[in-house]
């Protein structure tokens, strides 16, 4: 068996475990809109920690950022600044948004904003902006998965197939279990990443 066969098996097993966790997560919440979109507001500190981390540490953080640092040098340090400045306001805004959501039953950004400023046009605009911002972010993640899959298999698994496999896994558990699946798969992947980082940090020296 060639080396890339073993690597492919490991990656497929990882995707399989992620899929299983995502599908199982849907059993923990109701079949209501709040259950699908907000996981019945059950996420605690641990889950939110990893969800926030997954939001920040995207494919760009693992591939684009290091690649840019390699080619451009110290100029890439600005990423640390905008990362902090982008997340810091939510330390203050997040709890307030959460309280309003629980009080009035809001589960989307459009509902939250139009609850304060009643306007059909504003609601539609915010929904369009949210989707428009989400599409390139999603494409970035799938492209990153395709690049990693192709690289670790030495090109035997083409970029498009790796991206399609990752997308198929994600779309399956998201359609089935909603945000609950996203949250608990993020917890699994975050803990896995920490375990690998610490293992390599101890083993390599």
Image (spheres, grey):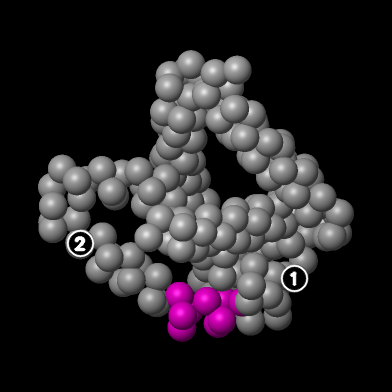
Task: Please tell me which residue is depicted at 42% across the width and 45% down the height of the picture.
Answer: 59
Q: Earlier in the sequence, mark 2 or mark 1?
A: 1
Alpha carbon of mark 2 to alpha carbon of mark 1: how far? 36 Å
- Image quarter of residue 183: bottom right
Q: Which residue is mark 1?
A: 42
Residue 175 in picture, x, y percent from top left: 72, 41
Q: Are marks 2 and 1 in contact (CB under 8 Å)?
A: no
Which region is colored magenta?
90-98
Task: Please tell me which residue is depicted at 25% across the width and 43% down the height of the picture.
Answer: 67
Q: Residue 110 or 152: which is nearer the viewer?
A: 152
Q: Residue 50 or 191: which is nearer the viewer?
A: 191
The quadrant of the picture occupied by the N terminus is top right
Residue 42 in picture, x, y percent from top left: 75, 70
The quadrant of the picture occupied by the C terminus is bottom left
Q: Is residue 119 left or right of residue 31?
A: left
Q: Residue 15 or 111: which is nearer the viewer?
A: 15
Q: Secondary structure at mark 2?
A: helix
**Position above or below: 149 against 128:** above
Q: Residues within 10 Å of mark 2 (few under 14, many from 20)?
A: few
Residue 184 in picture, x, y percent from top left: 69, 58
Assess whether residue 11 is covered by the magenta stretch: no
State the mark number for residue 120.
none
State the mark number for residue 77.
2
Can residue 159 be seen from the camera position used here?
no
- Image quarter of residue 204: bottom left
**Position above or below: 11 against 40:** above
Task: Please tell me which residue is depicted at 31% across the width and 44% down the height of the picture.
Answer: 64
Q: Is residue 124 left or right of residue 73?
A: right
């Amino acid at each position: 068996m060639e080396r890339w066969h073993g690597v492919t098996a490991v990656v497929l097993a990882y995707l399989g475990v992620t899929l299983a966790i995502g599908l199982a997560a849907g059993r923990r919440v109701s079949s209501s809109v709040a259950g699908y979109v907000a996981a019945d507001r059950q996420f605690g500190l641990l889950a939110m920690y990893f969800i926030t981390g997954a939001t920040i540490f995207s494919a760009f953080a693992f591939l684009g950022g290091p690649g840019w640092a390699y080619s451009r040098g110290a100029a890439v340090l600005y990423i640390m600044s905008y990362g902090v400045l982008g997340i810091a306001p939510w330390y203050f805004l997040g709890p307030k948004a959460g309280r309003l959501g629980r009080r009035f039953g809001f589960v989307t950004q459009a509902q939250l904003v139009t609850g304060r400023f009643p306007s059909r046009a504003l609601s539609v605009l915010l929904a369009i902006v949210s989707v428009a911002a989400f599409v390139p972010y999603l494409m970035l993640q799938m492209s990153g998965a395709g690049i990693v899959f192709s690289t670790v298999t030495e090109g035997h698994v083409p970029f498009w197939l790796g991206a399609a496999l990752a997308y198929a896994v994600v779309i399956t558990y998201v359609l089935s279990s909603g945000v609950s699946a996203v949250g608990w798969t993020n917890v699994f992947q975050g803990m896995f990443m920490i375990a690998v980082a610490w293992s390599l940090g101890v083993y390599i020296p």
